[in-house]
Image: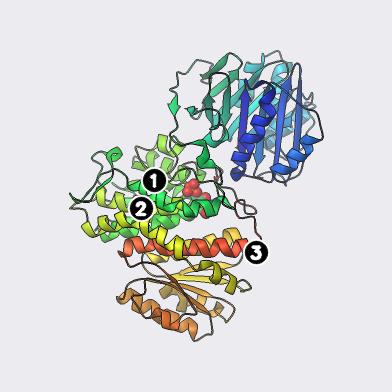
Amino acid sequence: MCGIIGCVGRGDGTLDTLLHGLSKLEYRGYDSAGVALVDDRSVSVVKKSGELDALREELAAIDVSGRVGIGHTRWSTHGPPTDGNAHPHRDCTGDVAVVHNGIIENYQSLRDELAESGHEFRSDTDTEVVPHLVEASLESGADPEAAFREAIGRLEGSYAIACVIAGTDSVFVARNDSPLVLGIAEDATYLASDVPAFREFTDKVVYLEDGEYARLDTDGWRVSDIDGGTIEKSIETVTWDPEDTGKSGYDHFMLKEIHEQPRALRQCLQGRVDELRGTVTLEELGELSLERVHLVAAGTSYHAAIYGAQLLQAKGVPAQPFLSHEYATSPPPAEDAIVVGVSQSGETADTLAATREARRRGAETLALTNTVGSTMARECDHVCYIRSGPEIGVAATKTFAGQQTALNLLTEAATAGQADRDVIAALRNVPGQVQEVLDSSKAEAVAEAYLDSDAYFFIGRSLNFPVSLEGALKMKEISYEHAEGFAAGELKHGPLALVTSQTPVFATVVGDGELARKTVGNVKEVEARDAPVVAITDGQSDVARYADHVLEIPETHPRTAAILTNVQLQLVAYHTAAKLGRSIDKPRNLAKSVTVE
Ligand code: AGP
């Protein structure tokens, strides 16, 4: 949902620094981009619809520079992705430029009021009211910092905002409900929606909280409250390297991240599993015990939440998954439930709304997230990190596997009774088994075989039900093909009407027990309707007899099998999208981090 970058102190390198930062933030939105640079007494703004390269081309043709700058990459909320709606937005004089991530809910009344007093608007965006509000305060005699503060004081809604004003070598910053982090180096200060934007230049960060303001200038930085009082902030150090946010020779971040899964899972398990003693420990949770659990999440994380609820239920813990946007607005009774927010980014507005609602009603909350220092990690009572490392591709891959793994750890560590030794052994093996799947997968050939299909269906039971939902979500997100996931038993209750010879059915069948037998029955049903069948299987059942293609996984515990089957489906989606020439890392209309409700 829009990426913001800003920097002070990079001298002649300001523009390059902004563009570098925007390239690292493009995953947040990529329908237009722009920069504002302050030099001497003027502010220059260059912005362009399309991906960042369009802005680069535009900049190559003009001479623009500045000592202080801000930049933005957009995911549209108000107004289509045009040059005019791209950020930064300016006031009437052109002396104030603003970038914004979030939604200003009262923008229409502010816009009417400003228009009445003579301000002229050039865009359809909610953001444009901000530079005009700053302009109005400057006109009434406020100094730049006070003018910025006054403007922000008028806003309702969510925002991460950065503003530059001609005549000052400063960037003014405010945060409410949208992420912002400062990067602190000896010779320069940065701000961004996410750390990768400036990680190349520093590993020292300061996370801003809701209601906080910051001013970055050539003398350093200061964080303050609404009244201007200084807030002492601690400087934290990020632990991952700048290279972790590059493609490392892969064609796409998504493919790189799929291949990073063995390492990501090892990191997730490290120091948390003692195979000899048969124990799982999540030190960060202390004595937390899960008696009743609500898991709240959206998208891929919701699929992980379904999987996690199934694990907990199998341990006798009443656990339910909820779509976070539904939970936030129609919360169920939650007596003694611990509410677990499952979120890769820890910034998803819907999921934050759900954990906040839970806290408001007195529930204890736990963030299960990949992002250290994220809003959810800071707001919840407890946090469990999945340790997948930065994920840039919009389609979540390694973080889903990380969530599955961490939910196994959570289930073993925080429920009554001894940890399950078979599960511990299976978890130990899973990074190596994911590697086996990656090394031997025939998913590319399967993708090729079904490229011209009318639709793609995914079926599975129990722990492979959420995997089927996830397989379909991956396919639709990046290939733009119609795909649906179903619990295998549900197929005959309606979706079977859609099944034809042009709709391949991807069936996950693990083990040779009752679940496998029943799913093989469903496979026969679709086969009888001429649908091609792709079986994702460990080979224990006879599903291969009825399948046109088989994608194999090693035999393992059913819990970790659901991690391996998902890897095969990730690869099918990836290769389908690659063969169709889709924009894999930046699919149309989507953004990595959905910070608006
Ligand atoms: C996953 O491929 C999607 N991009 C999306 O569904 C995502 O999982 C969802 O927006 C939730 O994000 P979160 O995990 O950061 O909360």
Query: Considering depth in this image, is 309 or 268 the residue closer to the camera?
Result: 268
Q: Disc 2 vs disc 1: Cβ atoms closer than 8 Å?
A: yes
One can see residue 542 in this view? yes
- Residue at coordinates 38% horizontally, 38% vertically from top-left? 380
Query: Considering depth in this image, is 360 or 466 the residue closer to the camera?
Result: 466
Q: Which residue is mark 1?
A: 386
Label 2, label 1: how far apart the Cα atoms are: 8 Å
Q: Residues within 10 Å of mark 2 (few under 14, many from 20)?
A: many
The secondary structure type at the circle numbered 2 is helix
Q: Which residue is mark 3?
A: 580
The secondary structure type at the circle numbered 1 is loop
Identify the amino acid type marked 1: Ile
Measured from the top left, where is residue 190 in percent x and y? 58, 26
Q: Which residue is mark 2?
A: 405
Q: Residues within 10 Å of mark 1 (few under 14, many from 20)?
A: many
Relative vertical location of residue 214 with respect to residue 52 in this rendering, above or below:
above
Nearer-N-terminus badge (1/3): 1
Nearer-N-terminus badge (2/1): 1
